[in-house]
Image: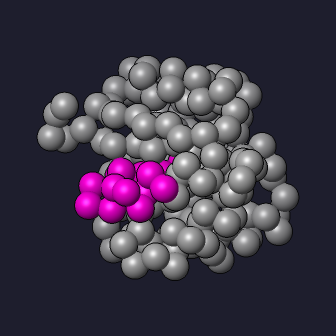
Amino acid sequence: MAANELRVLLADDDADDCLFFKEALEELSLSTRLTIVNDGDQLMKWLLKNTSRLPHVLFLDLNMPRKNGFECLKEIMFNDKLKALPTIMYSTSSEQDVMDRLYQNGAQYFIRKPSDFLKFKRVIHYSLTLIMQETSLQRTKNNFILTGESYFIKPETI
């Protein structure tokens, strides 16, 4: 395992979506290590067990059994050992009130799951690039929602 490897944690209960995510990540020109959990309870247990070596980023599905993404996000933000973890919410939902709540509750970004693989790969690449470049810049509501159409990446970089 490389020292500069980006540790990515995915919390999603849909096996097809997990495979889609894994394949997109594998095609990127980034060194990553993916860990997958399949529900909110598993996620919180994994995070609490690994507080000394948290992932660099968490991709958190909104609709999961046992504990949904909203509940997990709140727990993460109220835990001093977890609240600095960049959390990217993602869902098929595009309801403005949902996105507003996620922003207010501390999510770093929101991705509406695209069904097109290239767009999905682009938005994953873009979000990881943003996470790796984060400094003290405050996230704003204007850059909270990431889509596969919101930027252009040269094909050879993804």
| Residue under the image location 52 percent in, 63 percent down | 108
Residue 73, x across and y down, in percent: 59, 66
| Residue under the image location 68 percent in, 24 percent down | 16
User: Is any atom of residue 118 visible in this view?
Assistant: no
Query: Image quarter for residue 6?
Result: top left
**Closer to the camera, 146 or 83?**
83
Query: How many numbered badges does the structure rendering display?
Result: 0
* Position of residue 42 in the picture relative to residue 138 (left or right): right
| Residue under the image location 51 percent in, 21 percent down | 23
**Closer to the camera, 145 or 151?**
145
User: Is any atom of residue 22 visible in this view?
Assistant: yes
Does residue 109 lie above or below 64 as drawn? below
Residue 48, x across and y down, in percent: 41, 62
* Position of residue 42 in the picture relative to residue 61 (left or right): left
Does residue 48 lie above or below 27 as drawn? below
Query: Image quarter for residue 154?
Result: top left
* Position of residue 35 in the picture relative to residue 32 (left or right): right
For the record, the magenta segment spans: 45-59
Most distant residue in the left direction = 3
The image quadrant where one finds the N terminus is: top left
**Closer to the camera, 77 or 157?**
77
